[in-house]
Image (cartoon, helix red, strand yellow):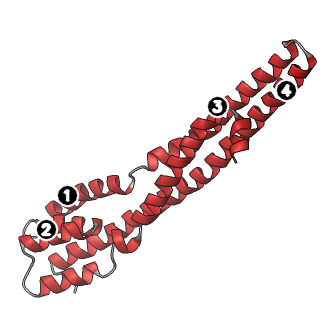
Amino acid sequence: MLEIIKAAGWPIYPLILASIVAIAIIVERFWTLRNEVIAPSNLLPEVKKWLAQGGVTKETCEKLQAHSLLGEIFASALSNASSSREIIKESIEESGRAVAHKLEKHLSTLGTIATVSPLLGLLGTVIGMVELFGAFNAAGSGHDVAQFAKGISVALYNTAGGIVVAVPAMISYRYFRAKVDGLIVEMEQQAIKLVEMIHGERK
């Protein structure tokens, strides 16, 4: 691996940095965007029990808010439980926007890496080609061959490096975008059920 990095030249270092950042984001998002962490399926039944036992207190709302991102939305709705349906929905929408922002954390960076990596690889390719053509003007046949080989190595390794970094980053970005959209839809449905419970329309 070290020999490949040496052969690829300095243009490979931005790609290595981009790959490290991408891997860190992918691992972090895989760990964070788990259904049982974001939108636990047992939370709505628990809230239903609390409502049946005589309502929800301020302490319960604070506990809900610290429980999960779905809990934050539920806490926002329950803190306005005595208000009209429109006000409750507005509070849910405001809380939902903040939750969506948290779910999308780092995804723009991952998308940027997926887009920029091929361009970084292309930059390395261009630099390699410049070195390659420079070999034709160099003095001494031995030096020509060495510089020619180096130019080819820089061009090919950086082209491959850009693709190797970009493809997993783009696949992961698309996967996490779909995951976030699915979680948002799930939380919206749960919030609608909660509003119906508050107003006695759902048992």
| Residue picked out by circle 3 | 10
Residue 126: x, y in percent? 72, 26
Q: Looking at the rendering, in which quadrant would you find the C terminus?
A: bottom left
| Residue picked out by circle 1 | 90
Q: Are marks 3 and 2 in contact (CB under 8 Å)?
A: no
Q: Earlier in the sequence, mark 1 or mark 4?
A: 1
| Residue picked out by circle 2 | 62
Which amino acid type is shown beneath numbered disc 2? Glu
Asked whether residue 74 appears in the rendered view, the answer is no
**Label 4 – label 2 distance at C-alpha:** 68 Å
- Of marks 4 and 3, the one in the foreground: 4
- Of marks 3 and 2, the one in the foreground: 3
Image-based side of 193 in relation to 178, left or right: left
- Of marks 1 and 2, the one in the foreground: 2
Residue 49: x, y in percent? 17, 86
As drawn, 83 above or below 144: below
